[in-house]
Amino acid sequence: MILNAEPSLNAELKPAGEARNPGPARLPEGRPAPPVAAAPAAAPPAARRARGKPEILQLPLSRRTVLVTADVVRAVYGVEAEAVTAKVESGELQWVFDVSVRGNHVRVPRFWARELMAPEQCQMTPAQAVAMILGPNRQNWRSTEIQQLLLTSRATMMRWHRSRVLRGKTKGRTVWVTRRRLERFLLKRLWWKEL
């Protein structure tokens, strides 16, 4: 026995030997159903790219992700590294922080994820932006939390601490930094202030 694939008002089971082509679909009143237009075939990815319309992927970011690397910016915009640098230097991306260790001639940018997702919501003063990046309630930060926020290594954090670029109090093996010092650090590290 097979189940008839056509939905009908009186669905019935038919033996396998009696299966037949049901013919054109009919409405309950006996009239033929209007033909259904076939959906146009989707263009292959190469054809979409050829027309200049990149395929947009909706990738969720964790709420804990505040700053992102240049690779994430490249992925969001679908551009080369030089194009990201051009966006920064032109001011199109303004909330960029240099988290390099001083004395190193290579700048290490971190971009505010909010500016990538909703740039119209990021028209504010530097102090307001830094306050939003750090959140409203945190007054003291552990070194590991700063590493997570700035996407840096423990070695970088310890270099900042030892060179007094980002000082804090050491309790056990953990460095604690006050909000005020972290705010000052980020304000000094704004990319466009260094240009």
Image (spheres, helix red, strand yellow):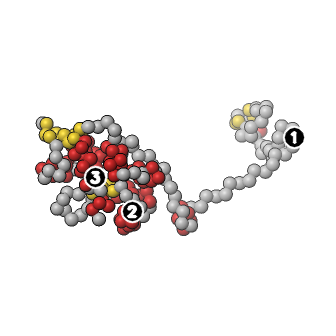
Whichever of callouts 3 and 1 sits on the residue coming sooner in the sequence is: 1
Any mark on residue 30, and which? 1
- Is 161 in front, or is 69? 161
Query: Which residue is identified by label 3?
Result: 187
Instruction: Tell me the quarter of the picture where residue 173 sits.
Output: top left
Tell me the residue that label 2 is attached to.
91
Spatial distance from mark 3 to mark 2, Cα to Cα?
Answer: 16 Å
Task: State how far apart marks 2 and 1 are (Cα).
Answer: 67 Å
Q: Secondary structure at mark 1?
A: loop
Between 4 and 127, the one lying in front of the other is: 127
Label 3 is placed on what type of residue?
Leu
Q: Is residue 167 left or right of residue 36?
A: left
The answer to which quarter of the image holds residue 40 is bottom right
Quadrant of res 44 = bottom right
Q: Give the answer, above or below, for where 9 lies relative to 116.
A: above
Question: Few, some or many C-alpha atoms within 10 Å of disc 1 (few <14, some 14-19, many ≥20)?
Answer: few
Percent of width and height locating residue 102: 18, 59
| Of pointers 2 and 1, the one earlier in the residue sequence | 1
Q: Is residue 80 visible?
A: no
- On-image quarter of the N terminus: top right
Please, what is the three-letter code of the amino acid marked with disc 2? Gly
